[in-house]
Image (spheres, rainbow, N blue to C red):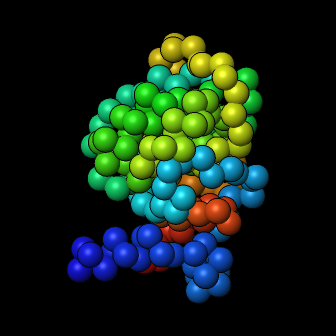
Amino acid sequence: MKQTREIAVTTFSTPDLSDAAPEALAIELPFGNYGGRKRFSGAAVTIKCHEDNSLVKACVGEPGEGRVIVVDGGGSRRRALLGDMLAEQAAANGWAGLVINGVIRDVDEIGATELGVQALGTVPVKTDKRGEGQRDIALHFGGVVIEAGDFIYADNNGVLVSKRPLL
């Protein structure tokens, strides 16, 4: 059964999922697909932070178990919420990917990392580390509410959020 799940995860299409499950909502933001894994899915872990990726750093250090970290950085393009070292740690710890309402850096290295990464763009500037932010709260961005435990599906077409598993 596990093998079937892995095959489904690598072959799904968000347009097909949307057609089959119209209750699944698309995040209405112009994400770019930056990770080495161009298609990913999993249960959401939510983080809200602004120009401080302390909680992202802590989260990627935990066992990912195929989940997706959804980060609401308020759409800021001034500070990168993810770089190559955190992306490599996330991949090594079994996270499926990250969806970031904000920007990243080290895109060449992240593109070579077996991790899904959707973000609004890039900037070379790192964040401050002030230990600020919130985890496992409802996030509101891109016309969607995303709660911890919701199911995330992402590919080159965009990102879907569902209250129930679609695969």
**142 to the left or right of 110:** right
Percent of width and height locating residue 111: 54, 44
Q: Residue furthest left?
A: 1
Place residue 92 in its image quadrant.
Answer: top left
Place residue 119 in its image quadrant.
Answer: top right
**Number of dots carrying numbers:** 0
In the depicted view, which residue is nearer to us: 64 or 33? Answer: 33
Residue 89 against residue 41 in the figure, above or below: above
**163 to the left or right of 29:** left
Percent of width and height locating residue 98: 51, 46
What residue is at 34 percent from the left and 71 percent from the top? 6
In the depicted view, which residue is nearer to us: 7 or 52? Answer: 7
What quarter of the picture does the N terminus occupy?
bottom left
**8 to the left or right of 158:** left
Residue 50 against residue 37 in the figure, above or below: above
Percent of width and height locating residue 131: 47, 17
- Please indicate, yes or no, whether residue 19 appears anywhere in the rendered image: yes
Place residue 101 in its image quadrant.
Answer: top right
What residue is at 45 percent from the left and 49 percent from the top? 115
What residue is at 41 percent from the left and 53 percent from the top? 96
Residue 104 against residue 163 in the figure, above or below: above
What residue is at 36 percent from the left and 34 percent from the top? 89
- Please indicate, yes or no, whether residue 148 appears anywhere in the rendered image: no
Percent of width and height locating residue 123: 70, 27
